[in-house]
Image (cartoon, rainbow, N blue to C red):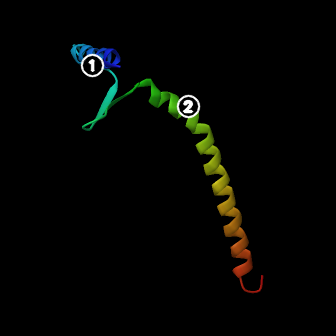
Amino acid sequence: MSQRRENYRAALRREQDDVSGPRSTKVTTLQSRYVRVTVEVDPDLQGDLTRWVVRPVSSVVLVGTTVLRTLVDTVGRVSRPGG
């Protein structure tokens, strides 16, 4: 158990020493007394997410617009006097 702990601490020290040049990724570190979590986000992820999300979001917007137009037309016909 102590060997694993020492290996982990050595890896953390090496990671801190490896920060020699500027990074192209976004890094966020959350640290508390017992836990340290580092999250790195690849800059290409934004492009991937955009490609994955554009079609479903466009479809939802199109369906929502169609539903709202149908409701407006229906309410407009029903609420008109003499119609």
Secondary structure of residue under mark 1: helix
Q: Nearer the viewer, mark 1 or mark 2?
A: 1
* Viewport quadrant of the N terminus: top left
Percent position of residue 13, x then y: 23, 17
Residue at position x 51%, y 28% in the image:
48
Q: Looking at the rendered structure, which numbered label has been put on residue 35?
A: none
- Measured along the vertical axis of the image, is residue 63 above or below residue 50? below
Type of amino acid under label 1? Arg
Residue 46, quarter of the rendered image = top left
Q: Are marks 1 and 2 in contact (CB under 8 Å)?
A: no
* Viewport quadrant of the C terminus: bottom right
Q: Looking at the rendered structure, which numbered label has been put on residue 51?
A: 2
Residue at position x 23%, y 18% in the image:
16
Would residue 83 be found to the left or right of residue 1 on screen? right
Crowd rating for badge 2 (residues with CA inside 10 Å; few <14, some 14–19, many 20+): few
In the image shown, does 10 or 56 lie closer to the viewer? 10
Percent position of residue 52, x then y: 57, 33
Furthest residue to the bottom?
82
Type of amino acid under label 2? Arg
In the image shown, does 16 or 45 lie closer to the viewer? 16
Residue at position x 71%, y 81% in the image:
80
Furthest residue to the right?
83
Q: For mark 1, what is the residue?
A: 9
In the image shown, does 72 or 5 lie closer to the viewer? 5
Q: CA distance from mark 1 to mark 2?
A: 39 Å
Crowd rating for badge 1 (residues with CA inside 10 Å; few <14, some 14–19, many 20+): few
Percent position of residue 77, x then y: 74, 75
